[in-house]
Image: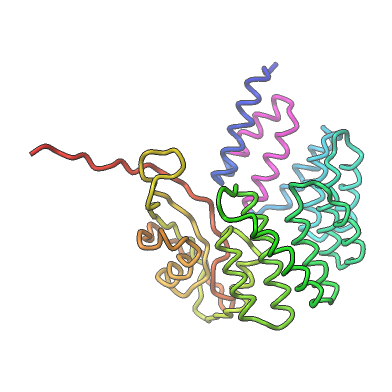
Amino acid sequence: MHDRHGVDTLIEEGRQFLELEDYDRAIAVGKRIERARHSYAFELMALAHAGRGNLQEAIATLERGVKLAPSVWLLWQLLGNYYSDTSRWNDAQQAYLRARECPNADESSIDYNVALALLREGKTADALRHCDRVSSPELQLKKSALRIDIYAASGDTAKAVQYAEQVFAEAITVGEENLDEEEAAGIAGVCSAYAHAVWKQGDANQALQLAWQAISWWKHQETAMWLIREIENKRSCCAKHHRLIIEGVWPEPIESKEEAQGFFVTYEVVAESPEEAFDLAVRFEPECVRESLRADECEVLDEVAEVPKGVYYVSGYHQFPIPSPRVSHE
């Protein structure tokens, strides 16, 4: 038997490994949690497999999980999401139905994911109907971004842009101060959906400005990254896939920390050279840290000729303290 405290400790440890993108250790912890007979094991291992880019293994893990823990709605929803990611539309909708039947299921979360899958499938009217059912306050920004995408996908780009202008103006009235990461990501999602709608309407310059604005809110925004690459449209027969680790220093202590904080951040960039990869990556960092940035490591993974240059992935920050220099007496 495993005590509750021990399992909770393992769950927290697993979540930390996910946050650090240490997927091998996350999977190892997941196996220990599974031996303790806790359903979070399958969620943890599936997220780690997906983080490594192995969606088929993530799906297999969740299919095993829902057999052993069929009343856990989060497992069914995550399975539906990965089915959707692999264009298994019918399987996705069946998984969402099973999620909805579970006790304590979050109906708003499920409706949002159902709507997203239907949009991907091209069923915009059904997607809009489910989008309208999302009532959770925490999902309102994501709901607004999804609605913009649905309008644009249905061919009504004018309506998409008009609605986007309205919701984006309302979103940024919240102000930039004291936003948590989820709120910043939500505003970035609305901004990038707005950018995409503007691009589909034919205004590439405004779309590019909005995409960079989205990145300034939350630099992991994938639609914004994609738009920047597509609109800039820099291609080369000599392009390579680079994995670049950049080191920098925050100009002032972070939050309650007394010491200045250094950081590492990993980028995956398509460029002709490590120098160009660095130049493309640093644009994603706040201006206040750019002078401190330097390339720590750069690995060339493979050639990717004619793929648009630019940033394809950026990790979170891995911080470390920088002690203040000691002042010696004369």
Is residue 32 covered in magenta?
yes
Observer-nearest of 136 and 322? 136
Vertical side of 121 occupied by 77: above or below: above
Apparent side of residue 137 relative to residue 49 in the rendered image (left or right):
right
Q: Does 325 appear above or below 300? A: above
Query: What residue sits 52% from the left and 70% below the top?
Result: 270
Q: Which residue is drawn at 70% across and 76% down?
A: 198
Quadrant of the image containing the N terminus: top right
Residue at the spot x=63%, y=39% of the render? 27
Image check: 194 left or right of 106?
left
User: 27 and 108: which one is in front?
Assistant: 108
Residue 81 in the image: state x and y as whole percent.
Answer: 78, 52
Measured as percent of width and height from the top left, residue 271 is found at 49, 73
In the image, residue 282 lies at what x, y percent?
45, 65
Quadrant of res 85: bottom right
Residue closer to the observer: 128 or 247: 128
Residue 175 appears in which quarter of the rendering?
Answer: bottom right
Compared across the picture, whether 286 is left or right of 37 comes to: left
Locate the C terminus by quadrant. Answer: top left
Q: Give the range drawn in magenta.
A: 26-52
Q: Is residue 97 left or right of residue 87?
A: right
Q: In this view, does 144 lie above or below 256?
A: below
For the view shown, which residue lies furthest in the bottom direction? Answer: 202
